[in-house]
Image: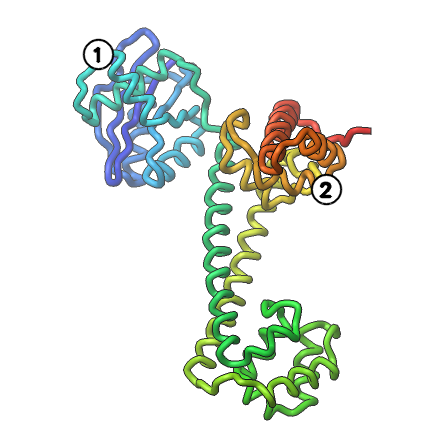
Amino acid sequence: MIYVGIDVAKDKHNCFILSSEGEVLAEVFTIPNSMDGFRCLLDRLRSVTTPEDKIKVGLEATGHYSYNLLGFLLNNGLATYVLNPLHTNLYRKSLSLRKTKTDKVDARTIAAMLMSDVGLKPYTDTVYHNEELKSLTRYRFDKVRERAKLKQSIARLVCILFPELEKLVPTLHMASVYALLDEFSGARQIAEANLTRLKYLLGDASKGRYGRDMALAIRDAARTSVGSVMPAKSLELRHTIHLIQELDTEIDEVEVSIQAIMEQINSPITTIPGMGFRMGAMILAEVGDFSRFALYNATKYVCHWDPTFAAYLAKKRAEGKHYNVALSHAAKKLVRLIYAMEKSGQAYRPAA
């Protein structure tokens, strides 16, 4: 067995090669963070090993700095292990190595950790998908949060330009309302609009849900509106609507990518009632060890859709527990369920 320790940095990586007999096959050497550097590492490995040798490569988790090297190692069929920097630091101290961090020491420490086989697990396709999911779900979360702020701006601007509108529709954030405000971004513009045009605009955007009656009601409200005539605010309203629509498209694209990965993983987590692919992806991406994660928000949906969980929650409430306390009990039950499902690979089966 051959062990390779790599200390990853932004522009260069320090490498160290050790045999299972403790023989140093290559003293610490530095490669640039480039394809030439990666190939140099591969050539160096081939020069000190035979085709029969098994090779383990270890490197610390250093965020985006390690992604490219990690991909290169995996593409070349090398068993690769991503180590927690805290663990390597503790391991270094346990070996009585120098307390001062140096790249050469870290490269040796990583190789020694691989040789000691301290319960390390190789970086697999599952881990890769998990990282992809984490990246996508966090990116989606940022986009959704950005969109929520823009929606708050829509409500503020409508309150200035046409406050009566909010009482006429279920929500301002509908395709029909956005289409209306994009073309007529204020009460005065709507009041002066042609009724036929309003009817067509609302009907087309709502797919026939709204017609002449809604168009007439909105125009009548606009004609008696207390809304201000402020061209600057109208411009801001139109631009904000466009930004939201762009974000809608981007979020849809991200969700397609998330769903594609979830289909590859084929996790049974989505067979739980109330657990959609988006929430399932967030859980799989962030949870890590299922035994230490309480799925509080997910539990609310599961209790709503699954009779067994609903009954369990009701039982805890009947025992006099506060709702949040009862829900925490249900969350623990859900953790145990998901853990068992992930271990067995079996889909969820509701109780008879």
Q: Which residue is drawn at 45% across and 53% down?
A: 142
Frontmost of labels 2 and 1 is: 2
Image position, residue 59 (x, y; %): 34, 27
Residue 221 shows which numbered tag?
none
Q: Which of 195 and 320 is in front in this view?
A: 320
Rendered view: 214 above or below 122: below
The quadrant holding residue 22 is: top left
The quadrant holding residue 252 is: bottom right
> Is residue 129 in sight in this rendering?
no
| Among the two numbered marks 2 and 1 on one chain, the one whose residue lies closer to the N terminus | 1
Kindly state the secondary structure of the residue where label 2 is placed: helix
Residue 96 shows which numbered tag?
1
Q: What residue type is labelled 1?
A: Ser
Q: What residue type is labelled 2?
A: Trp
Q: Is residue 245 left or right of residue 270?
A: left
Residue 305 shows which numbered tag?
2
Q: Which residue is drawn at 58% across and 33% down?
A: 325
Report if the CB atoms under discs 2 and 1 are less than 8 Å apart. Answer: no
Q: Tell me which colouring the rendered structure shows.
A: rainbow
